[in-house]
Amino acid sequence: FAGNSFIILSDSVSAHEYAERTHNSIIHILQTQDALYQEDSELFIQEISNAFSPIVDFNRISRNVMGKYYKVSTATQRERFSEAFRTSLLNTYSKTLIEFKDERIIVLPPKKTSKSPDRVKVHIEIITSSKKYPGVYSMYLDKNNEWKIINIVVNGINLGLTFRSQFYSLMEKNNNDISATIDKWITSL
């Protein structure tokens, strides 16, 4: 039961509300678990990951990151990369939050109604002690009717495209060997 505490049914909740609740949970962890980070940073990262994971479609993002190589990869390679990508994204996200633990993430009210009811852009502001960074979550309703993030743009940097260029660059360095590229991605975690 506790593991499902972050799952919120979307028919009663907008993408904006879901994003806001997720951020509130994360901010709560950051504010109350500071001692845990000092004692056991891995467990702390796990706590953040547990709060953020339900709102992200890792399979869909990892498929976009693999880009043109997705179609020529095997099901096993896709699964391995999705898992590796999930770990790298959650580690990066958690470590960034720890660095800026006094930051606030504000979900801005919807600017306009989305043309498509199952796709929406959620605008956020990341406020640190010295700056404000704009961000956008691209979200969609999945087959379970839950809102999921499929891309993130922060301060003009499209993370999906950034990760894809990293993947393509690794593919070049590894003679287009998908398994070797995934191995390198994993060792860089």
Image (cartoon, rainbow, N blue to C red):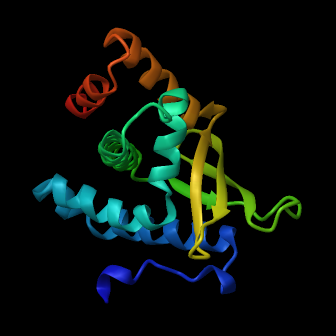
Image quadrant holding the N terminus, namely bottom left
Q: How many marks?
A: 0
Q: Is 89 rendered above or below residue 161?
A: below
Q: Nearer the viewer, residue 158 or 29?
A: 158
Q: Is 42 rendered above or below residue 70?
A: below
Give me the residue at 53% from left, 81% from top: 8
Q: Is 184 rendered above or below residue 44?
A: above
The quadrant where residue 96 appears = top left
Image quadrant holding the C terminus, namely top left
Residue ranking furthest to the left:
39
Q: Is 32 rendered above or below residue 172?
A: below
Q: Nearer the viewer, residue 93 or 171?
A: 171
Q: Position of residue 116 (x, y in %)?
A: 83, 62
Q: Position of residue 183 (x, y in %)?
A: 23, 29
Q: Position of residue 106 (x, y in %)?
A: 62, 59
Q: Position of residue 27 (x, y in %)?
A: 44, 65
Does residue 177 appear to the left or right of 9 in the view shown?
left
Give me the residue at 56% from left, 76% from top: 144
Q: Nearer the viewer, residue 129 or 52?
A: 52
Does residue 184 appear to the left or right of 153 in the view shown?
left
Does residue 114 appear to the left or right of 102 in the view shown?
right
Give me the residue at 54% from left, 31% from top: 67
